[in-house]
Amino acid sequence: MNLNEEYRPKTFDEVVGQDSIIDALRHDVKDPKPAYLFCGGTGVGKSGSSRIFAREIGGLIHEIDSGSCSAEDMKNILEATKTRPIGHDRIVLIIDECHLLSIQTVSKLLVTIECPPKHLVFILCTTEVDKVPRTIFNRCKVYEFKPIDSGAIQNRLRFICDRGGFKYDEKALGAVSKMARGSMRQAVAYLEQCSYRDITLANIKETLMADTYDNYFNMLFHVLDKDVVNIIQEIQCITNAQTYVEQFFSFILDVNIYVLTKDFDMIDIPDAYKEELDGLTSTDIVVIKKVRDMLVDLQYYGRNNPIIDKLLLAELTKIVD
């Protein structure tokens, strides 16, 4: 069993970072609505909360895979749930990533959501709420799950480490919490990836950051050193240039914010990189601002351009020339 399975919330009290939603669901236990829509990013508690709520209202749980559920499958499922089950107060249909349902499947679903049996409750989950048909959205009670605060994630990671007997330091847990970008599932997965040895900043940096922040800092320092050869090599190693430009831009913005504030709480870069950031000179900062402005323009005129990697190279070499 992996850590995410072992420490998946089993009660409302164990759900982290969604207090207002959990309070509302507790209130709804006595009188659940026919249909709910849980929306938000990955790993923020949508599926876990749906299962907990289903158990709290005495539901027999059926989970539906939207990606493989055909209109005929949905018709059969809804037909089978018309009768109240023996030994349960309700039937709860949990439909994960409901935006993937076909138009035909949504049509079958909509008929029952409009006038469901009293014992039937729908919980639809999605990471892309904008793709959920309005006909479905408008018939659900909607809860928006927010990204989880990094401090709350760090507290949960500390609990898991203490329970699991992992040796750790707080700065390392803080770095992992920030890297997860609001996703508890991702944070726990990162923790497990590093748990084969002591969880320290050095080990976190080596295990998790070699393909992210290390790459961005390498590129930045090559630019500051006017090292065109290594700039070219870095760009040649990029697998998705569009994504790289977007993420490198976010990184450069964080560097600018840190230079102004010296506050790691305001940026996503972990404080494992404090030495690199504090070592930047006033001359470096002038160049970094040029890189920032260039990336703003490049994201506009280079979006979906098949040669955006070459455009990035051209712009960076122009800056260092």
Image (tube, rainbow, N blue to C red):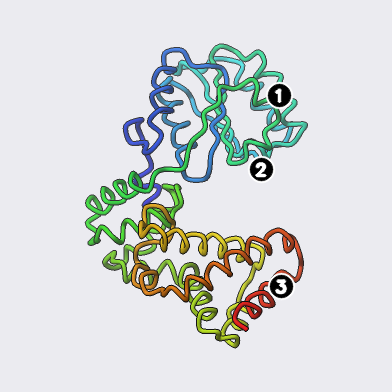
Q: Amino acid at mark 3?
A: Leu
Indicate which label's residue lies in the foreground, 3 or 1.
Answer: 3
Disc 3 or 1, which lies upstream in sequence? 1
- Residue at figure coordinates x 36%, y 35% from the top left: 10
Residue 112 numbered mark, or none: none
Answer yes or no: do the residues labelled 3 and 1 have beta carbons within 8 Å? no
Q: Is residue 94 visible?
A: yes
- Residue at figure coordinates x 28%, y 66% from the top left: 200
Q: Which residue is mark 3?
A: 311
Spot occupied by residue 3 in the image (x, y as percentages of width and height): 36, 52
Judge from the rendering whether residue 271 lies leftward or rightward of residue 170; answer left or right.
right
Q: Secondary structure at mark 2?
A: helix
Disc 1 or 2, which lies upstream in sequence? 2
Spot occupied by residue 320 in the image (x, y as percentages of width and height): 59, 81
Spot occupied by residue 142 in the image (x, y as percentages of width and height): 55, 26
Disc 3 or 2, which lies upstream in sequence? 2
Answer yes or no: do the residues labelled 3 and 2 have beta carbons within 8 Å? no
Q: Amino acid at mark 2?
A: Gly
Q: Which residue is mark 1?
A: 135
Spot occupied by residue 217 in the image (x, y as percentages of width and height): 47, 73
Image quadrant where residue 58 sits: top left
Q: Mark 2 Cα within 10 Å, few/some/many (few <14, many 20+)?
A: few
Residue nearest the observer in this picture, 111 or 248: 248
Residue 67 numbered mark, or none: 2
Q: Mark 3 Cα within 10 Å, few/some/many (few <14, many 20+)?
A: some
Q: Quadrant of the C terminus?
A: bottom right
